[in-house]
Amino acid sequence: AAPRSASPAVQRLCDTLKAAGDTKTKAWFDGYMKGSITHYGVKMAGIRSALRAWWKDEDLRGLPITAQKALAIEFFDHPMFEEKMAGTLALAEQIGFADAPAADPSSDDASPEASGLTRHDLPALRAVLADGRLAEWSSVDWFCVKVLRHIVERDPLAAREVASWKAEDGTAATSADGGLWVRRAAAVSFVYAAKHGDASPPNFPGFLDMLEGVADALVQRTDERFMQTASGWLLREMWLPPAPRAEERG
């Protein structure tokens, strides 16, 4: 059944993705994900191509930016991987990102009406993880590296906010625990920035210490495999040469 919030425009792209599915591709992806999410059987290039055509055909650039963001986020209400990936790609590639104020990184005057995603969108993006609309590692990790990564890399305040998600409530060691995916995002969103250290803008003094705090908090959750793997991924990027922590180790 379609989500109760489904708009006709979003449903049209979902129908297009369903029609484009390939049975062999579906079988491979479903098997790889071991039933944690199901697929229509559309590869990434096909999702991206369908999204671009849909965005143009629906004339979505003519909508207010808040309406564009709402439509993109609506895809996460739908159950299939390709639908969720369409939401991630819409946010990252059709809407994009706005820079935080450069003169004073500690200020909080970036407008929620900015032309792209900013730290003001983090509550809505965090909710997608916390309420289980994204609740398996593949779509969560894509969301982190395609969307959250580019927000935290533009804005120290956003970086600190996402890093604080390491303490998200929720103790159940199951993939249905929304808190688990919020906590994983606290690490995975930084795997690209981690290798650049404190001195490489927009990173800041204390950046690597902040990330070590994230990794330490997650690794304490010994009953949660996805916390262990997120912590390990983040630490690897911080410590493997030529990462700054590797240079400190000498």
Image: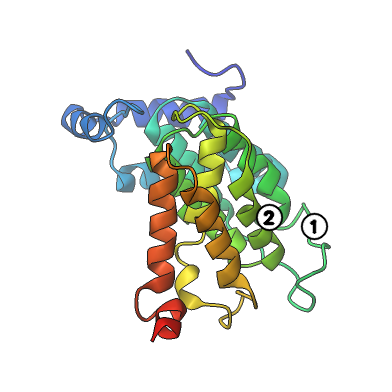
Q: Which of the two residues, 97 or 164, is positioned nearer the viewer here?
A: 164
* Mark 2 burial class by Cα count in 10 Å: few <14, some 14-19, many 20+: some
Residue placed furthest toward the left: 24
Q: Position of residue 63 (x, y in %)?
A: 68, 44
Q: Which of the two residues, 248 or 157, is positioned nearer the viewer here?
A: 248
The secondary element bearing badge 2 is classed as: helix
Q: Residue at x 45, y 77 (%)?
A: 245
In the drawing, does residue 143 fall left or right of residue 232? right
* Mark 1 burial class by Cα count in 10 Å: few <14, some 14-19, many 20+: some
Q: Residue at x 65, y 52 (%)?
A: 164
Q: What residue type is labelled 2?
A: Glu
Question: Marks 1 and 2: in contact by CB < 8 Å?
Answer: no
Q: Which mark is residue 20?
A: none
The residue labelled by disc 1 is 111
Q: Eyeballing the image, is 237 above or below 165?
A: below
Which quadrant of the figure contains the C terminus? bottom left
Q: Eyeballing the image, is 10 above or below 151?
A: above
The secondary element bearing badge 1 is classed as: loop
Q: Where is residue 69 in the image (x, y as percent from the top left)?
A: 64, 43
Q: Which of marks 2 and 1 is nearer the N terminus?
A: 1
Report if residue 89 is visible in the image: no
Q: Which residue is drawn at 59% across and 25% down?
A: 7
In the drawing, does residue 32 fall left or right of residue 140? left
Report if residue 108 is visible in the image: yes
Q: In the rendered image, which quarter is residue 80 located in?
A: top left
Q: Which of the two residues, 139 or 136, is positioned nearer the viewer here?
A: 136
Q: Where is residue 244 in the image (x, y as percent from the top left)?
A: 46, 80
The residue labelled by disc 2 is 161
Q: Eyeballing the image, is 164 above or below 198?
A: above
Q: Residue at x 60, y 71 (%)?
A: 207
From mark 2 to mark 1, how far is it between C-alphas?
A: 17 Å
Q: Where is residue 197 in the image (x, y as percent from the top left)?
A: 52, 77
